[in-house]
């Protein structure tokens, strides 16, 4: 069992990632991707393991799936778009960008029309939310998933009342008028919540399952808790030096209970 480091103070707020942290959404996402790629005439796509692409924005995920088909090496960095575009433009054709956008659009339509009945909370997630509420620990969501999808899922799961705020990569795009606001980074999401709710830096934890979650927390100056059995690669996550690493979300409740005694 993990031990809470002395430098990690008991939280007054928990900021959760969503996919791979609170919910297992992979079955419904994979089904929608298969249908979206089929609509683009790519029905024989071989999808990589979920840990390869589940921690990115929708467009980046499409690029990574297409990139995987080219048998080119994928690296988890911030230049996915430019790397993939340059290689595909030279190896495929000038319609690459339109193909990507058509798949992105098709996925949104298919996923939004899906019942999402196979998206479920991870074991221990609900218990942690209940424990946090009972002990006056405010909870939030900061995710790369589209805001409309997150709100729909938490409503279906009956957990919407547990969260003070949900912020997604596209939150500012929804809230703003032209020109379109760029997607928010994880750091920007965290900082937005900190500033809006005056969250204490030392007592606000970011809980996530990817290197992007841990890096965002570090850049925002708050402690991070890495969940190693989510969608991210443990090796990549640990390289970001999280404040604490646990195997699964159930361990967090046990740590908080021990700390509160």
Image (cartoon, grey):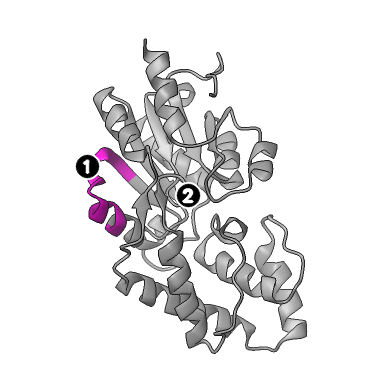
Query: First in sequence: mark 2 or mark 1?
Result: 2
Circles 2 and 1: CB distance less than 8 Å?
A: no
Residue 110 position, x and y percent, is 37, 76
Could one spot residue 180 in this view of the protein?
Answer: no
Residue mark closest to the camera, 2 vs 1: 2
Task: Determine whether 100 is above or below 173 in the image.
Answer: below
* Residue that appears at 46% across and 40% down: 190
**Magenta residues?**
152-165
The local crowd at label 1, few if under 14, some if 14 to 19, many if 20 or more residues have their Cα within 10 Å, is few
Task: Determine whether 3 is above or below 205 in the image.
Answer: above
Image position of 9 (left or right of 44): left
Residue 11 position, x and y percent, is 41, 23
Residue 187 position, x and y percent, is 53, 43
* Residue that appears at 40% across and 62% down: 173
- Residue furthest top as drawn: 261
Per the image, label 2 sits on a secondary structure element best described as loop
Foreground of the two, 128 or 168: 128
Image position of 46 (left or right of 184): right
Q: Quadrant of residue 68?
A: bottom right
**Magenta residues: mostly which secondary structure?**
helix
Task: Determine whether 54 is above or below 244 in the image.
Answer: below
* Residue that appears at 36% across and 39% down: 125
On residue 115, which mark appears? none
The local crowd at label 2, few if under 14, some if 14 to 19, many if 20 or more residues have their Cα within 10 Å, is many
Residue 16 on the magenta segment? no
Residue linked to disc 2: 20
On residue 161, which mark appears? 1
Foreground of the two, 222 or 206: 206
Per the image, label 1 sits on a secondary structure element best described as helix
Could one spot residue 43 in this view of the protein?
Answer: yes
Q: Disc 2 and disc 1: Cα gap in Å?
A: 20 Å
């Amino acid at each position: 069992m993990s031990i809470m480091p002395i430098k990690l103070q008991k939280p007054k707020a928990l900021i959760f990632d969503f996919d791979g942290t609170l919910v297992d959404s992979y079955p419904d996402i994979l089904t929608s991707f298969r249908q979206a790629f089929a609509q683009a005439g790519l029905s024989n796509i071989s999808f990589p393991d979920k840990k390869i692409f589940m921690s990115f924005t929708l467009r980046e995920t499409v690029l990574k799936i297409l990139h995987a088909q080219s048998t080119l090496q994928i690296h988890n960095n911030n230049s996915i778009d430019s790397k993939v575009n340059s290689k595909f433009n030279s190896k495929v054709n000038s319609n690459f960008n339109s193909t990507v956008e058509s798949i992105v659009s098709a996925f949104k339509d298919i996923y939004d029309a899906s019942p999402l009945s196979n998206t479920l909370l991870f074991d221990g997630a609900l218990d942690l939310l209940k424990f946090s509420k009972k002990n006056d620990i405010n909870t939030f969501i900061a995710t790369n998933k589209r805001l409309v999808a997150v709100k729909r899922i938490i409503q279906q799961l009956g957990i919407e009342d547990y969260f003070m705020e949900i912020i997604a990569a596209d939150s500012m795009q929804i809230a703003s008028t032209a020109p379109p606001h760029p997607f928010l980074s994880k750091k920007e999401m965290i900082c937005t919540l900190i500033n809006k709710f005056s969250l204490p830096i030392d007592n606000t934890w970011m809980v996530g399952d990817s290197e992007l979650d841990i890096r965002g927390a570090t850049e925002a100056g708050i402690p991070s808790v890495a969940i190693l059995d989510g969608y991210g690669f443990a090796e990549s996550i640990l390289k970001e030096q999280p404040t604490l690493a646990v195997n699964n979300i159930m361990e967090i409740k046990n740590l908080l209970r021990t700390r509160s005694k």
